[in-house]
Image (cartoon, rainbow, N blue to C red):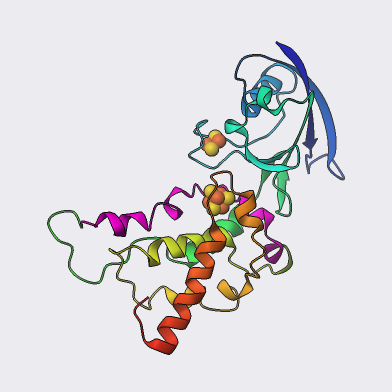
Amino acid sequence: MSDITFHVKRFDPAVDKAPYYQDFVVPVEGSMTVLEALFDIQEKQDGSLAFRYCCRSSICGSCAMYINGRYRLACQTNVAHMGVPRVTVEPLPHVPLVRDLVWDMEDFFVKYEAIKPWLIRNSALPDTEITQSPAERLKLNMPIDCILCAACYSSCPSVWTEENYLGPAALLKAYRFEVDSRDEAGRERMPSWDNERGVYRCHTIANCSEACPKELNPTEGIQWLKGSAVRRRLLGRKK
Ligand code: SF4
Ligand code: FES
């Protein structure tokens, strides 16, 4: 067991004029994660500490934070493996702060919904499942793992500077459905991403792919969408 100092960003809009940092010493043992350390702080030192979590197993995306200068999932980050005596925990940067480590995800999900993030079928649904070949399924392997943690969104300079930009997570989801062999949206979904608040705001900086704690590559998806727009418009292709 070793004592680790957690340097945590705090802000309560009801009483604080500006965010500040507070130190908490936590005895860390075994495979304790940063999320478990936050629970420890909340239970034993300061019950007012606010943070978001749900699954505790890297699948809901709720606990994305900025930990020692990197985008990480708190529930996936083993404190001992970081090998440092002091861990700085901050909310995702460049997004509206609600309180402590919690930020306002309203705009993020409004933009996500704008790209119609569901399978669109125009033909009648068959009585059995709609099958895919292994090659068709392979195309979904990367984008389907997105857990909507928004680390990519928070890391993107185009999001910082253009408030209407849909951002990498929404565009990765558009890509996920456009490459799905079962999707029949044709050009129905395309206007949502083929515009100045969509793929053309991406300047291929690739911060999103660097930030993603699931090691996904939103930049690759966005580049595919740009190519697809050209193929559809100039060559009349379906995708
Ligand atoms: S692409 Fe990665 S960083 Fe972006 S929302 Fe999905 S899982 Fe999170
Ligand atoms: S609590 Fe669900 S991803 Fe961390």
Stretch of the chain drawn in magenta: 131-159
Above or below 25: residue 226: below
Frontmost residue, 16 versus 223: 223
112 is within the stretch colored magenta: no
Frontmost residue, 24 versus 107: 24
Residue under the point 37% across and 58% down: 139
Classify the position of ligand 2 by quadrant: top left, top right, bottom left or bottom right. Answer: top right
Residue 110 visible somewhere in the drawing: no
Residue 220 % position (x, y)? 53, 63
Above or below 56: residue 236: below
Above or below 187: residue 233: below
Position of the C terminus, as image quadrant, is bottom left
Residue 224 % position (x, y)? 48, 69
Above or below 213: residue 209: below
Residue 140 visible somewhere in the drawing: yes
Frontmost residue, 106 versus 204: 204
